[in-house]
Amino acid sequence: MIKFSFSRFSFWGALDGVSFQPEQKFGRKMGVNEDQQKLLRTLPGVDYLLELTQADPFFKTVPNSVVTRSIRLVVAELRKSILDDSQNTAGKNLSDETIIQKVRERAEHAIHPNLVTTINATGVVIHTNLGRSPLSPDAVENLLTIAKKYSNLEFDLTKGMRGSRYSCIEEILCEISGAEAAMAVNNNAGAVLLCLDTIAKGKKVIVSRGELIEIGGSFRIPDIMAKSGGILKEVGTTNRTHLKDYKNAIEDNTGLLLKVHTSNYSVVGFSAAVTLKELVALGKTHHIPVMEDLGSGTFIDFSKYGMIKEPTIQESVATGVDVVTFSGDKLLGGPQAGIILGKKDMLHTIKKNPLTRALRIDKLTLAALESTVSAYRDENRAIETIPTLKMLTMSFKAIEMKAVRLCHLLEDLKDPRLSIQLVDLSSRVGGGALPLLELPTKCVAIKIKEISANAIEKFMRKNSTPIIGRIEEDCFILDPRTIQDDELVIIGTAFENLLKRT
């Protein structure tokens, strides 16, 4: 076997086997001084650094492609820092040990998953940026079971032939909601698009001007309607729409009466809106289908738990509406999905739309959704086992007890720089649901002498398990409502590490 040994200076920071003289590429015309040129010549080559990594145990399990790319990126960064540094301070970081450490950090970052779990200490229960609703233990267990085995996703075990992937959830959705038929797609925007494309393509869709909402990511109802081929017909005004506005707008080419629940904002004061029941009656009179987009649908009447009244899915279905759509990962507390309920003949037509395949739900989401919806057979069990519902209905006393436990964990660090205070603030539902509702909560407000709240927030965000809090009045705020019990110790350890490093 022939073994090659490479000099540290085999190439001047060579990338992709290319070598050139720095004086030719970065001469004095480029503003590079002699000291910078000398530093550029001392940059080690890729082959030399690769040889060094072979003796480092860390790189034994790192793919060669990752190691090579990490080396090239580190050398490129060092070259740039030298060229940008007219004071020549960058030369202090060119030892083999320092460079290999940078390569190690770069490689570790590359092989670490980009999607990681976080601790939501913001108090926003359905936090869109943090993955919305966490799944229940039952949903997670069922998801794992289905993921690691084959399943009867599209196989009818009774008939021994191809079946429908919607069969596993249709019966339970109809049982809970009272609908004749049901199906699910990848999200609620997809559900709305699919329904509009099926029912009203090339036809006019009458909707109140006050219900032309914009949802997260700048997706707007008019845009979704245009993409579906439906023709938007606005009626009424921003704050007041009457039944006569719908009546006067009906024409021969009217294909749908659409009601959109404004779950992510509220119009208060001098306002008026047509109820779904009134709209359904009007639709029957003129033989025009009626659809309601609930956005963040719920099977539970939250007013029983001291919260603002939201229309339930059961109440909407009971009006006789033809189609209802809503999200699975908001107030329902399940995985991301768009659920469609309604009349059997209408759902049959929707299922045959070619778009259904493009928007279809996958087996893992179906598994989690089935377990989530099944919990609603017993409302008390749903409240206890579905994390979103549990956090929303959590008593102030329970939140306060958790806040006190967190305070004790931090006080046990016995650092005089640490200032901890219990404060009364508000949590939010989030996810575009119940926008006016403020949930009373007991938060932990933290200050550290000579460390700004912004610096604390940044450190916590970069923790091995990122901790996402909020800042108010120059304090780093932790809201126990959205912190799980097993996450308190992680928070305590993170603050211990922060205090040790400063």
Image (spheres, rainbow, N blue to C red):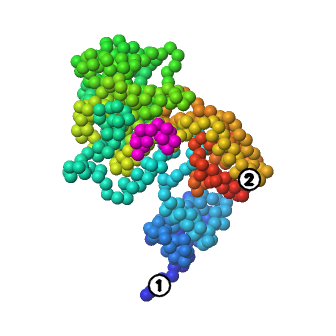
Q: Nearer the viewer, residue 108 or 430?
A: 430
Q: Which residue is mark 1?
A: 3
Residue 208, horizontal then vertical, whole percent: 39, 20
Identify the secondary structure beneath mark 1.
Answer: loop
Q: Quadrant of residue 306?
A: top right
349 or 13: which is nearer to us? 349
Residue type beneath disc 1: Lys
Quarter of the image containing the C terminus? Answer: bottom right
Q: Label 1 neighbourhood size at 10 Å, few (<14), some (14-19), many (20+)?
A: few
Q: In this image, 74 relative to 479: left or right?
A: left
- Asked if 81 appears above or below 458 in the picture, the reply is below
In the rendered image, residue 161 lying in the magenta stretch gets the answer no
Quarter of the picture containing the N terminus is: bottom left
At 29% from the left edge and 43% from the top edge, which residue is drawn? 167
Where is residue 43, by image quadrant?
A: bottom right
* Magenta-drawn segment: 371-386
The answer to which of 330 and 265 lies nearer the viewer is 330
Mark sitting earlier along the chain (2/1) = 1
Q: Is residue 421 above or below residue 288?
A: below
**Crowding near pointer 2: few (<14 within 10 Å), some, many (20+)?**
few
Mark 2, residue position: 412
Membership of 381 in magenta stretch: yes
Residue 464 point in image, percent of width and height: 58, 56
CA separation, marks 2 and 1?
A: 56 Å
